Amino acid sequence: MVSGPNFETIAEARMLLTLGCDCVGMSMVPEVTVAKHCGLRVLGLTLVTNKVSLDYSREEKVNHDEVLEICKMRAELLQKLVSTLIGRCQQNINTH
Ligand SMILES: O=P(O)(O)O[C@H]1O[C@H](CO)[C@@H](O)[C@H]1O
Ligand SMILES: Nc1nc2[nH]cnc2c(=O)[nH]1
């Protein structure tokens, strides 16, 4: 996790990769921290939207519009996933 609001620099991205990170975000950890503080049980779901830049010579840079575009493309799929998960949780509650 990085605190944002900016995306990580290439140097930071390389450091995260060296540390063994597969994925990086900004929101999940603070959101989970607040939810746990409120006594909620938490399941985190993440949509990976973009590749992090690791190379100074590459032209393309990560930007928020790209993130939003991928989110829109995957919204329906995520809605189905969440609906299925909630359905299975309800089944589990009813049978136990
Ligand atoms: O950590 P995630 O959920 O990827 O969110 C972060 O990534 C997005 C940046 O495009 C912003 O919404 C920021 O809050
Ligand atoms: N830290 C970080 N958060 C993101 N959220 C969506 N894309 C990214 C990214 O490239 N880096």
Image (cartoon, grey):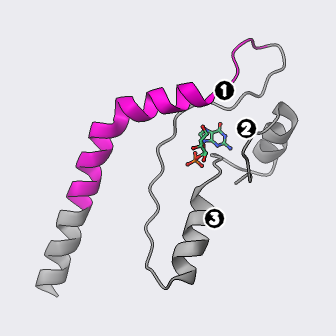
In the image, 67 versus 17, the foreground residue is 67
Prevailing secondary structure of the magenta residues: helix
Q: Is residue 8 left or right of residue 22?
A: right
Give SS at disc 2: loop
Q: Looking at the picture, does residue 55 appear above or below residue 83?
A: above
Q: What residue does disc 2 label?
A: 7
Q: What residue lies at 60% left-to-right and 55% top-to-bottom? A: 27
Q: Residues within 10 Å of mark 2 (few under 14, many from 20)?
A: some
Task: Tell me which segment is drawn in magenta.
Answer: 58-85
Q: What residue does disc 3 label?
A: 30
Q: What residue lies at 73% left-to-right and 38% top-to-bottom? A: 7
- The amino acid on which the numbered mark 3 sits, given as a three-letter code, is Pro
Label pair 1/2, CB-CB below 8 angstroms: yes
Give SS at disc 1: loop
Image location of residue 53, percent across then percent down? 73, 27
Image location of residue 47, percent across then percent down? 46, 44
- The amino acid on which the numbered mark 2 sits, given as a three-letter code, is Phe
Q: Residues within 10 Å of mark 3 (few under 14, many from 20)?
A: few
- The amino acid on which the numbered mark 1 sits, given as a three-letter code, is Val
Q: Is mark 1 within 8 Å of ligand 2?
A: yes
Q: Is mark 3 within 8 Å of ligand 1?
A: no
Label 1 and label 2: CA atoms lie apart by 8 Å
Give SS at disc 3: helix
Q: What residue does disc 1 label?
A: 62
On-image quarter of the C terminus: bottom left
Label 3 and label 1: CA atoms lie apart by 22 Å
Q: Which corner quadrant of the figure contains ligand 1?
A: top right
